[in-house]
Image (tube, rainbow, N blue to C red):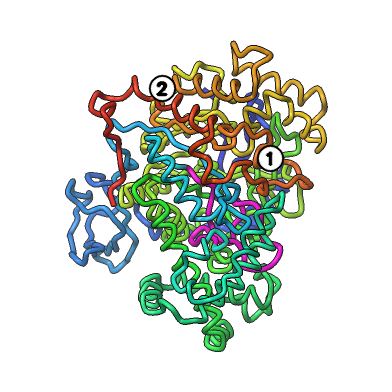
Amino acid sequence: MTEQPTTDAWGIDASWIDALDTEHTIAPETIDRLRQVIGRPPADLLETAPIVARPGDALEVDEADVECEDGQTRHVDGELPEDFPLGYHRLRTPDGRERRLIVSPGRCWLPEGWRGWGWAVQLYATRGRDSWGIGDLGDLRTVRELAQAQGAGFVLVNPLHAVAPTPEQEASPYLPATRRFRNPVYLRVAEVPGAEGVDLEADAGRALSDAELIDRDAIWAHKRRVLRRVFDTGADQGPFREWWWHQGQPLMDWATWCALADVHGPDWHTWPEELRDPRGAAVAAFVTGNESEVAFHAWLQYVVDLQLSAATEGLTVIQDLPIGVSGGGADAWAWQEVLASGVSVGAPPDAFNSTGQDWGSPPLVPWRLQAAGYEPFIQSIRATMAGAGGLRVDHVMGLFRLWWVPSDGSAADGAYVRYPYEDLLDIVALESHRAQAIVVGEDLGTVEEGVREAMAEHGILSYRLLWFEDDEPATWPTTAMAAVTTHDLPTVAGLWTGADLTEQREHGTGTDEELERGRDSLLAHLPGVPAGASPAQAVEAAHRRLATAPSVLLSATLDDALAEERRPNMPGTTERPNWQLPLSVPAEDLAGHPGVQTVARVLAEGLAPHLPTEKRKGGRGKKKK
């Protein structure tokens, strides 16, 4: 067993171990820099931070009264009774001290004996004939209906979180302005309440789909103009206002930030100083003077909520949680006291990137997150799970440790900072239990010892890829989501034809030798496929192999089913149109596409031998509404 690195009082690891088991020592100047950013944790942190426990656990306090969420008060003597209610409570000790008490079931929700296969969808790429240049929530409904008709158990979608409402729209779904609210660019405008009363300029909207790439700037400009026209009619204002009242301060912060961004730009650091404080008098005055603009951005979230609920009805839709947010965005503005400044999240050097990676998101400071009662994390998890029945946690290793990159250095100059992972995993389990949502952790790449064991203990499904695993799929764990590839890796057709290799060469992502070796290593996962096979045959062969896995979830991308040669994203490239490539087949035609039919049949056939008899007769696990 590899010895764990030494961690200091700030949570910084003194060294890190790469995939080849080589230890690298962190430079003293890096540690000093990160200590300055983190700040010394308060001496009484362990006495004031939330207590996260499970029914039956011993507590850190001998005696206390607990004011429970439901209003009841219960007395505890050193441990929680087995019947103690789950949830977020307030604990008071006899000397008057108060702490948050979070009681978790300890394991995520998963229907007993259930297995399912499903489609992984880049929604922006899944355009239909009525789409306005980008796949929308109407198209998600079409995909959901397709999945239900084929007997699928779930749909996995890219992050739907909102970006700044300004020009130069952020293309990457993994760098949102918030992890609590969703992107109105996905609205099907014609189905918004009140849309029937205005000129939608629908022909101009549909014409946006004629473009070869997804032009988010043009699409959002058109959608926003029409949506504002709908909002200004005042239609459906009663239900919206009631809904808004129940959303509380988080939505008010989001709508206010959007209205401020419209005036001052998408990075709050560049705003007039008096507007950088969300609770300041200047912000309150701005809201008073711009009530209509703030209400418009709140209303957009209302209609997104309506359409998402309709699009996901009756099927588990697994939503993706990015590792972080934009440093200039709404969450960073609202939670600036909890986020670190002068650093960003990334990854250390590895075999695929010798200089490391910088993902651009500011990390949460661990001790400040605890001091905030874990509220930023709770809200992000809860909002992403809401109403759909599933959650995929991108880079789940970030709940254990994150690679912090100082702004004045390269990604290779960073260090790992530790997080209170047991508390965070218990919170995920509590939110999963409440939402009855399946949870998948994206644990690809270098995974330190203990991570997958902790995930299994908490009922978080692992992630297994055909491209990465050396073992036969039949030997993969049952507690996993199994797939061929992801949005960052080659599609089957792109790998098979060599088109992905050609594109990598064009963008200089490696030497010819490195790229050829990488392609050969992936092709080795398609044994027995004849050299002259068509891309469609290679796709079928890959999924027949995948279908032998006993994993709880089997996932296939629409890109693979359509034999698309270009992957959605090629990491390390800046000139390539990442996150802008539409699928070649309209959403309405997916059901009749031979590749989609073949992949669905192959996965369903692979699933059948592993199902109990009653499941084979047509029953399958469903989320409760």
Residue that badge 1 annotates: 26
- x, y percentage for residue 491? 63, 31
Relative horizontal placement of residue 240, taking residue 506 as reference (left or right):
left
Ranked by sequence position, the earlier of labels 1 and 2 is: 1
Q: Which residue is mark 2?
A: 606
| Residue 219 vertical placement versus 484 (above, below) | below
Q: Is residue 12 magenta?
A: no
Query: Please, is residue 224 above or below residue 51 in the view?
Result: below
Classify residue 27 as left or right of residue 321. Answer: right
**Do we see residue 8 in this rendering?**
no
Identify which residue, 94 or 506, lies in the foreground. 506
Q: Magenta region: which residues? A: 156-183
- Above-or-below relation of 524 to 291: above
Q: Is residue 162 within the magenta segment?
A: yes
Q: Measuring 76% from the left and 26% from the top, which residue is drawn there?
A: 515
Q: Nearer the viewer, residue 391 or 280?
A: 391
**CB contact under 8 Å: marks 1 and 2:** no
- Residue at 66%, 48% in the rendered image: 579
Between tags 1 and 2, which lies in front?
2
* Tag 2 secondary structure: helix
Point 34% across, 42% down: residue: 108
Q: Nearer the viewer, residue 602 or 421?
A: 602
Mark 1 is on which residue type? Answer: Ile
Type of residue at label 2? Gly
Q: Secondary structure at mark 1?
A: loop
Type of secondary structure dominating the magenta stretch:
loop
Q: From the viewer's perspective, tell me whether residue 139 is left or right of residue 17.
A: left
x and y percentages locating residue 324 in the rendered image: 57, 53
